[in-house]
Amino acid sequence: MQFLGRPHASGVAALLKAVNPDWSPAAIRSAMMTTASQLDNNYCLIRDNGANLTYATPLAMGAGQIDPNRHLIQDQILAITRSSNYNCSKASADLNYLTFMAFFNNTPSTVHEFRRTATNVGNGVSTYKAKVTEPLGTSISVTPDTLVFTDKYEKLSFNVSIDIQQMKEASSFGSLVWEDDGAKHIVRSLIVVYRVV
């Protein structure tokens, strides 16, 4: 199986760069992560060899099994992870990362807010709708939940709010999927939530 973080991922990155010479390293990483599959070569959910073959969490498999063929689709949405005006004194949640990791310490707040910017690398108009798989015990909202792109390389921002008021476990996992009309193009970001119990 092919997982992000393995040496051969560099080869897939080189392939993507050859096909898309104008893509930045962040765009290539985004394509690899957001199109990764949670299924193995037998189309079953990936299991964790180190945990008695239970279903693997993002901590064990990262974004999942990379799928080079899906990367070559031009009409997909990419989250760009670089910002020239980022203030390092801010919390890491303000970075335009592809994943969402919310850590709740011993504070009264039960809500964590994220802001992300997505870039359309497809040609023409593209409309993407958000679909959330909420980590157990959390409530998540995405605003806006629909992104309508009119031009190639157009950037649109959205907010993700994670509420853990009902969460009882120390950690929980989910995902945010952006799917275009007809479900032709799908990109996925992991959601990882930790709380001190």
Image: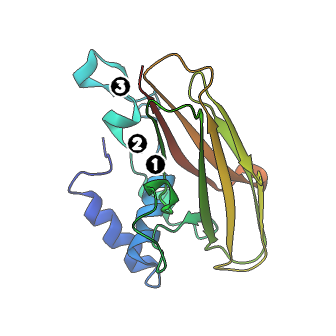
* Residue type of the residue flagged with mark 3: Arg
Residue 150 image position (x, y, % from top left): 79, 76
> Given the image, on which type of amino acid does mark 1 rest?
Ala
Q: In this rendering, is residue 192 above or below 77?
A: above
Contact check, label 1 and label 2, Cβ < 8 Å: yes
Quarter of the rendering occupied by the N terminus: top left
Report the residue that reaches farthest toward the front.
108
Q: Residue at x 38, y 73 (%)?
A: 25
Q: CA distance from mark 1 to mark 2?
A: 5 Å
Which numbered disc, 3 or 1, marks the residue that appears first in the sequence?
1
**123 or 114, which lies in front?**
114
Percent position of residue 54, x then y: 36, 17
Q: CA distance from mark 3 to mark 2?
A: 11 Å
Q: Secondary structure at mark 3?
A: strand
- The picture quadrant where one finds residue 170 is top left
Name the residue carrying label 2: 64
Residue at the disc numbered 1: 36
Residue at screen point 32% across, 46% down: 3
Horizontal side of 107 relative to 131 (left or right) equals left
Q: Mark 2: few, some, or many residues within 10 Å (few <14, many ≥20)?
A: many
Residue 47 is tagged as 3
Q: Is residue 2 above or below residue 79?
A: above
Disc 2 marks a residue whose amino acid type is Gly
Residue 57 visible within the image: yes
Observer able to see residue 41: no
